[in-house]
Amino acid sequence: MIVVIQCAAKKKPDAGHLRRRDGQKMLFVADPDMAPASTAHAYARPDDISDAGISWRAALLEYNDNPRNNPLGLLPAWQLYQNPTYELLANHCGLKRLYILSAGWGLIAADFLTPPYDITFSPSADKYKRRRKKDCYDDLRMLPADTAEPVVFFGGKDYVGLFCTLTGCVKEPKHLFYNSANAPDAPGCTLRRFHTSTRTNWHYECAKAFIDGAISI
């Protein structure tokens, strides 16, 4: 079984960054022009052109293709986020069957070396962090379309659209939990309501129930 979980806002403070040639750390956001001034890092969108003449996304792919000894200290996606649920899922289903749905990078493998970013679909986030439906992103799609295993997704309603888009070519059954009174619009997915009084980040509770065997597909 393939497990996909949405990304999280809080990243580990010791996570390594992509850098410009002058050594300046990069932080990836949805709208660099609206971001607060900072001397700690420079801002860019993932698909902006870097000072190496290629997009930062392409630079990240090149880094992953040949990380050598990982001199920038980038963390694999499953270790980037502070919430312990990512590690629990990695231990439960294995890195080869775990993917992260990232608002900045797309559908990425759990072991994909990933720099910090502040991009989200949450409508309550600061404007410079907020990715809107009209924004253009060259999202990665690392889950093979010919996967032979069913897929289960843990994430909030704001991430359902991206999940459906990036798994649209997957022919195996896709299962999606939700906790709102009304089911989300998720073409091609089997929906199942997860009952909980938790409203913020309820999908972590759902994922843990899945790990514990309290719920299944």
Image (tube, grey):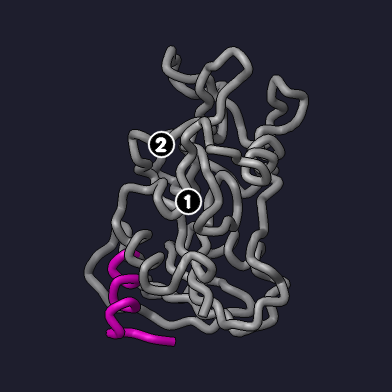
Residue 188 or residue 215, whichever sits in front: 215
The quadrant of the image that shows the C terminus is: bottom left
Q: Residue at 43% x, 12% y: name it.
A: 39
- Residue 135 location, x and y as percent? 65, 42
**Magenta span contains residue 22:** no
Q: Which quadrant of the view contains residue 204?
A: bottom left
Separation of disc 1 and disc 2 at Cα? 10 Å
**Element type at marker 1?**
helix
Count of picture labels: 2
Using a 10 Å C-alpha cutoff, classify the residue at mark 2 as few (fewer than 14 neighbours), some (14 to 19) or many (20 or more): some
- Residue 171 location, x and y as percent? 69, 81
**Magenta span contains residue 211:** yes
Three-letter amino acid code at the position of disc 2: Ala
Q: Which residue is mark 1?
A: 77
Q: Which residue is mark 2?
A: 15
Q: Residue at 53% x, 75% y: name it.
A: 2
The secondary structure making up most of the magenta span is helix
Using a 10 Å C-alpha cutoff, classify the residue at mark 1 as few (fewer than 14 neighbours), some (14 to 19) or many (20 or more): many
Residue with the most extreme front position: 69
**Element type at marker 2?**
loop
Three-letter amino acid code at the position of disc 1: Ala
Give the residues in magenta. 204-217
Residue with the most extreme left position: 197
Residue 143 or residue 21, whichever sits in front: 21
